[in-house]
Image (cartoon, rainbow, N blue to C red):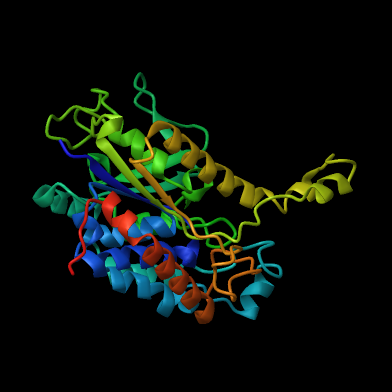
């Protein structure tokens, strides 16, 4: 059989305009939307929102423009809110999720995971995986029938999972994008980037899972396997990052400045959030790179400190809440340039031909 294609999109807030631009370029060149190319689409945070949009059939240009037109509205803050939160993020999230929820509601209405499953039946393409993180997980004690709390852990929603059929897409997107300090906790869940900011390894694990202990829970033709049951050689993974300022490191001089790295809470607190997301993102990329041959794995990441990056992006430390239109447009420009330079290679990797 031909290799199945997997799309993986990182978390990154409004920097999600970068993978959205690349996928729009693919569509403009080939007429193929992501749901018509990829067997499985896995996303975290902004990547989860994008993959959900692609899975329900929203146009690639519409999703790209969402970042350009709605960033200021979604990441809206006031001086009063800052004061109430203790001058920034000290005692409350930077932003309310009310406006984000409104935009998601406009895009997905009351659609559920089951609606995507029904689309999958027609084409066997466009499966959806969205990574979140559960702050209050519970498991069932088979002997007593009661639930009891367990440690924090990732929670992955999937259009093949019967247990997720009734989950509303709006709720899943709010869970996966509830970035700590940026947005409030949503229904006991926070941003999937806490553990799976790059969901490519999670997608590969699901694709090769052949365990036959999922009867009654997983929706597959044979009714029993917990994953897609593929072999590693069956896979092709396109992994899209959301761009990076390439500043997630600690200079040696800073480390040595206080007793040669003998740090406590006050020293570490500044770096831990970025360490948390960057470390799991790099680890996922490393594992997939080890498992798959170069012809099976393509990672596209944009670096804002490179000479080819637009001047306006260089030297900037760009977080997930970028909302200045000029910066977002510069990211679109940069993504388009990277796509043009690598167009033949990208289309060949996806087994696609341009329309003209």
Q: Where residue 173 sits: x, y (%)?
A: 38, 58
Image side of residue 117 versus residue 154, left or right: left
Q: Is residue 116 above or below residue 21?
A: above
Q: Is residue 130 above or below residue 353?
A: above
Return the residue nearer the eye: 316 or 136.
Answer: 316
Q: Quadrant of the N terminus?
A: top left
Question: Residue at coordinates 11% horizontally, 48% vertically from top-left?
Answer: 121
Q: x and y percent of residue 63 in the render?
A: 33, 69
Q: Picture coordinates of residue 49 (x, y %)?
A: 36, 60
Q: Relative to 251, is 233 above or below?
A: above
* Residue 109 visible to the viewer: no
Q: Is residue 277 visible?
A: yes
Q: Residue at x 15, y 54 (%)?
A: 119
Quarter in which the C terminus is drawn:
bottom left
Is residue 260 shown left or right of residue 95?
Answer: right
Q: Report whether 185 appears left or right of 298.
A: right
Residue shown at 56% from the left, 48% from the top: 277
**Residue farthest to the top, as pictured:** 143
Q: Residue furthest right?
A: 259
**Residue 321 occupies which quadrant of the picture?**
bottom right
Q: How many marks?
A: 0
Residue 327 spot, x, y in % from top left? 53, 76
In the figure, residue 77 lies in which quadrant? bottom right
| Closer-to-camera residue (199/314) | 314
């Amino acid at each position: 059989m031909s290799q199945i294609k997997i799309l993986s999109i990182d978390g990154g807030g409004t920097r999600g305009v970068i993978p959205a631009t690349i996928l729009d370029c693919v569509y403009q060149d080939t007429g193929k939307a992501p749901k018509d190319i990829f067997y499985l689409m896995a996303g975290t945070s902004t990547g989860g929102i994008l993959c959900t949009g692609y899975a329900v059939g929203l146009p690639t240009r519409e999703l790209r423009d969402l970042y350009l037109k709605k960033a200021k509205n979604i990441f809206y803050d006031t001086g009063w809110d800052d004061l109430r939160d203790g001058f920034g993020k000290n005692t409350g999230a930077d932003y309310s999720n009310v406006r984000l929820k409104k935009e998601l509601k406009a895009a997905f209405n009351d659609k559920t995971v089951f609606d995507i499953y029904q689309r999958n039946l027609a084409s066997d393409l466009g499966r959806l995986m969205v990574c979140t993180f559960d702050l209050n997980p519970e498991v069932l004690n088979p002997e007593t029938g009661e639930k009891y709390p367990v440690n924090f852990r990732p929670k992955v929603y999937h259009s093949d999972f019967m247990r997720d059929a009734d989950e509303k897409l709006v709720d899943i997107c709010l869970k996966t994008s509830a970035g700590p300090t940026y947005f409030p906790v949503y229904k006991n869940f926070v941003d999937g980037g806490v553990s799976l900011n790059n969901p490519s390894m999670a997608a590969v694990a699901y694709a090769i899972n052949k365990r036959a202990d999922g009867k009654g829970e997983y929706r597959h033709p044979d009714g029993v396997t917990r994953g897609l049951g593929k072999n590693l050689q069956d896979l092709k993974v396109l992994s899209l990052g959301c761009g990076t300022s390439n500043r997630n490191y600690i200079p040696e001089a800073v480390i040595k400045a206080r007793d040669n790295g003998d740090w406590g809470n006050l020293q570490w607190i500044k770096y831990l959030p970025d360490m948390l997301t960057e470390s799991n993102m790099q680890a996922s990329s490393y594992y997939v790179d080890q498992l798959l041959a170069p012809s099976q794995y393509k990672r596209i990441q944009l670096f804002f400190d490179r000479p080819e990056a637009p001047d306006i992006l260089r030297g900037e430390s760009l977080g997930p809440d970028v909302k200045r239109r000029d910066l977002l447009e510069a990211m679109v420009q940069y993504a388009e340039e990277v796509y043009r330079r690598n167009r033949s290679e990208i289309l060949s990797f996806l087994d696609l031909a341009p329309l003209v």
